[in-house]
């Protein structure tokens, strides 16, 4: 099967994540899209990252009923910090019958040269780059990478959601049903606002 690997912390998952993944699944010819959930980084404050089991639960509830969406927690048992190159190579070993392709945003593409062994990634795994508002035109100069034409641009980020919740804003419609309630109930983002930041697949 052709599997798209969609990495992120999903802290929390929102409708922008789902819309991009849905578009790539249906218009990119993928059999499945796997939401690669990054593990909780022990170096980050506990008030910044929701518990990984809760993030997994929220994504699984959000994607329920759509057969092309799956969750993937393979990085949880890998040495920390995890790197995309190691994850993709491990997935290829675990599932030799699948063809894995990476899905990242234009912001990550702009800094991919800083990723560990990024040339190995681009040589061995096709990479799809979707547009993000504020990142400008995407320049792709590698034969194994291609832009996702026509993908929706949704001006929502997990960091903006966390900041809004910290300010007491009701942003329930930015997220799949039930996610907002769990985010508020967790209490992680209610004490002080975080500064908006771009989500990155590579730590």
Image (cartoon, rainbow, N blue to C red):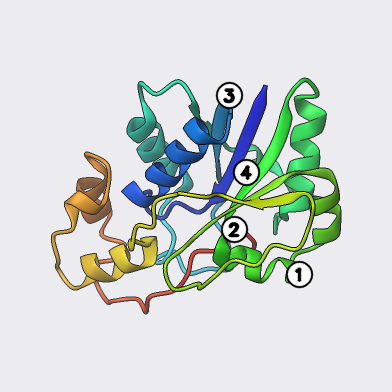
User: Residues under labels 3 and 4: Cα distance?
Assistant: 24 Å
Determine which residue is flagged by label 4: 76
4 or 2: mark nearer the eye: 2
Q: Residue at x 39, y 24 (%)?
A: 66
Sooner in the amino-acid sequence: mark 1 or mark 4? 4
Q: Which mark is residue 113?
A: 1
Q: CA distance from mark 1 to mark 3?
A: 29 Å
Q: Foreground: 3 or 134?
A: 134
Q: Quadrant of the C terminus?
A: bottom right
In whole angstroms, how far apart are the C-alphas of marks 3 and 2? 22 Å
Residue at horizontal 82 percent and vertical 30 percent from the top = 93
Q: Which mark is residue 31?
A: 3
In the figure, residue 190 lies in which quadrant? bottom left
Q: Name the one closer to the observer, 178 or 152.
A: 152
| First of labels 3, 2 by sequence position | 3
Q: How far from the left and from the top, in percent, is residue 10?
A: 44, 51
Between the residue at mark 2 and the residue at mark 1, the CA separation in whole angstroms equals 13 Å
Q: Residues within 10 Å of mark 2 (few under 14, many from 20)?
A: many
Gap in angstroms between the C-alphas marked 1 and 4: 25 Å
Residue 117 in view: no
Instruction: Give the mark nearest the N terminus, 1 or 3.
Output: 3
């Amino acid at each position: 099967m052709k599997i798209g690997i969609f990495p992120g912390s999903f802290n929390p998952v929102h409708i922008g994540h789902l819309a991009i993944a849905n578009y790539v699944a249906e218009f990119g010819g993928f059999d499945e899209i796997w939401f690669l959930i990054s593990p909780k980084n022990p170096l980050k404050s506990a008030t910044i990252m929701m518990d990984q089991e809760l993030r997994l639960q929220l994504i699984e509830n959000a994607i329920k009923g759509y057969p092309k969406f799956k969750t993937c927690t393979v990085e949880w048992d890998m040495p920390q910090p995890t790197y995309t190159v190691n994850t993709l190579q491990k997935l290829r070993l675990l599932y030799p019958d699948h063809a894995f392709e990476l899905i990242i945003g234009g912001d990550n593409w702009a800094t991919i040269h800083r990723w560990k062994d990024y040339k190995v990634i681009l040589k061995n795994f096709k990479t799809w780059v979707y547009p993000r508002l504020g990142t400008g035109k995407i320049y792709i100069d590698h034969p194994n990478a291609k832009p996702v034409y026509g993908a929706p641009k949704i001006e929502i980020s997990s960091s903006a959601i966390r900041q809004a919740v910290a300010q007491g804003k009701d942003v329930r419609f930015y997220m799949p049903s039930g996610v907002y309630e769990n985010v508020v109930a967790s209490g992680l983002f209610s004490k002080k606002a975080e500064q908006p930041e771009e989500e990155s697949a590579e730590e």
